[in-house]
Amino acid sequence: MITGHSHKPLIEWRAETLYVNPGSAGRRRFKLPVTLAVLDVQRERIEPRLIALLD
């Protein structure tokens, strides 16, 4: 499941469901990090990761 309304970056497995919130790649909001998510989807697995765009 991909979500995003909160702009809070998150990668979390709940049982067999992957929840991903990529954060926000736009201007900084509420002191949250500026991030995006990448999903490497293979036949046998999914590897999610968050990438910080600003320090």
Image: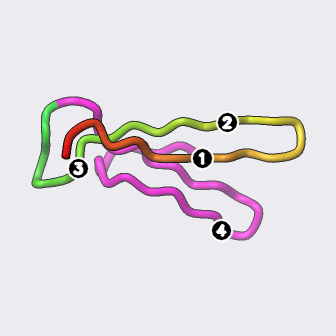
Q: Residues within 10 Å of mark 3 (few under 14, many from 20)?
A: many
Residue situated in front as seen by the camera: 17 or 22: 22
For the residues bearing labels 2 and 4, Cβ distance under 8 angstroms: no
Q: Quadrant of residue 39?
A: top right
Left of 40 or right of it: where is 5? left
Residue situated in front as seen by the camera: 41 or 15: 41
Q: Residue at x 28, y 36 (%)?
A: 53
Q: Residues within 10 Å of mark 4 (few under 14, many from 20)?
A: few
For the residues bearing labels 2 and 1, Cβ distance under 8 angstroms: yes
Number of numbered tags placed on the structure image: 4
Q: Residues within 10 Å of mark 1 (few under 14, many from 20)?
A: some
How far is the residue under mark 2 from the one under mark 4? 18 Å
Callout 3: helix, strand or loop? loop
Q: Residue at x 19, y 53 (%)?
A: 32
Callout 1: helix, strand or loop? strand
Of the numbered discs 1 and 3, the one sitting upstream in the chain is 3
Please tell me whether residue 34 belongs to the stretch shown in magenta.
Answer: no
- Residue position marked by numbered label 4 in the rendering: 14
Of the numbered discs 2 and 3, the one sitting upstream in the chain is 3
**Residue 38: percent from left, percent from top:** 53, 36
Left of 23 or right of it: where is 2? right
Q: Looking at numbered disc 2 in the image, what kind of residue is underneath it?
A: Asp
